[in-house]
Image (cartoon, grey):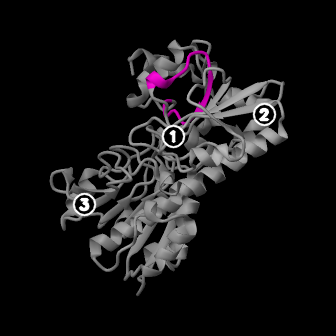
Amino acid sequence: MKRIGIVRETKNPPDRRAALDPEQCRRLMDDYPEVEITVQPSNLRCFKDDEYAALGINVAEDLTKCHVLFGVKEVRLDALLPGKTYFFFSHTAKEQPYNRDLLRAVVDKRIRLIDYEYLTREDQRVVAFGRWAGLVGAYNGLRGWGLRTRRYELRSAHDCFDLQELLAELDKVRLDKERITVTGGGRVAGGALEILDAAGVPHRKPEDFLSHQYPHAVQTRLDPWHYTRRTDGKSFDFEHFISQPEDYESAFDPYGKRTDLFIPCHYWDPRSPVMVTRRHLESGTFPIRLVADISCDIGEPIASTLRASTIAEPFYGYDTSTATETAPFEPNAVTVMAVDNLPGELPRDAATDFGEALLRNVLPELLDDKESAMLARATIADKGSLTPPYAYLEGYLAGRS
């Protein structure tokens, strides 16, 4: 018998998502009769305990007999069970200081940690909430713009039952001549563009965005070769950019000077160039009035992102003269939306979509008796040690970096 557990989310602020919905749990058990699933009870999860129980899924507090445990966000340290295999987004592989103790606990408890973010096939992630982050983040950006300009009011995304209800809200959007810039080319940016398209914002090529005036709102999307350039003057090379981002400098200024609402959706390596500095905002070089920072990297590459915000309070202000936090809609402030768990605002839709990807791409590999190269690539720690691909985290683990 292979026992799988669905953990109760323990991160604060709470996340309402689950790795698998009730129907997916039932389907997995039907397809693999040797699998038994136990769901830890939760009064916050978007799927009720009774929804699991109604389909014959065991709902119980004790997961100690489970071999593999699935969560979504980081697991609280005192909730980690020694010697288990865990799947969750750990946010440790980029040496995030706030999760150093989490990785230490994983190693100390001899846990096998498999991070969803690094489950890849042919260099493409196989499970992700990225589209949902883009959808909700761009929606929040438009909601914030309405609150800032007082032209319209949208309901909070988490007050919408599902995506269809959220999309219906966009009929209320009233824009003027705003210029909206989106960065990135992956699932996150794709989700953001879905929202802008649904709001009726026409798309323009980057070169036209720079050279034309428009009597209406427009959006453009930038790839890395638009917002960075090589310092040695050579042509942009994407593979080189990924491996050696320190050899590039920002080329964002022409776009920043023509942007009112900025929606960053790109992956940022700490070695990459900074895009929006304190000086850009203090001097008025960039007229940006709202940043819907879906990427949510604190401090850099966008100076106004001082901290992550929450679903309950998604907006804060960045005072351009003092570079400190202020009220979100002050006239001299940049409004910042930096919620770091955006898919949690549409938890049922996002969780079901994520669970389908797990069933399709990950669970067959897990339940196969053969060694899985994909799972190995995503295993950060196992049996009390970091795995070879993540050995670079030794200094981070020891507190030296």
Q: Residue at x 55, y 29 (%)?
A: 61
Q: Can the viewer see residue 314 in this picture?
A: yes
Residue 269: x %, y % from top left: 48, 40
Q: Quadrant of the N terminus?
A: top right
Horizontal and vertical percent position of residue 51 = 63, 49
Q: Name the residue that disc number 1 marks.
A: 42
Q: Which residue is mark 2?
A: 365
**Mark 2 or mark 1, earlier in chain:** 1
Magenta stretch: give its range: 77-92
- Residue type, mark 2 in image: Glu
Q: In this view of the protein, can residue 184 be seen by the observer?
A: no
Q: Earlier in the sequence, mark 3 or mark 1?
A: 1
Label 3 sits on residue: 328
Q: Amino acid at mark 3?
A: Pro
C-alpha span from label 3 to label 1: 33 Å
Residue 85 on the magenta span: yes
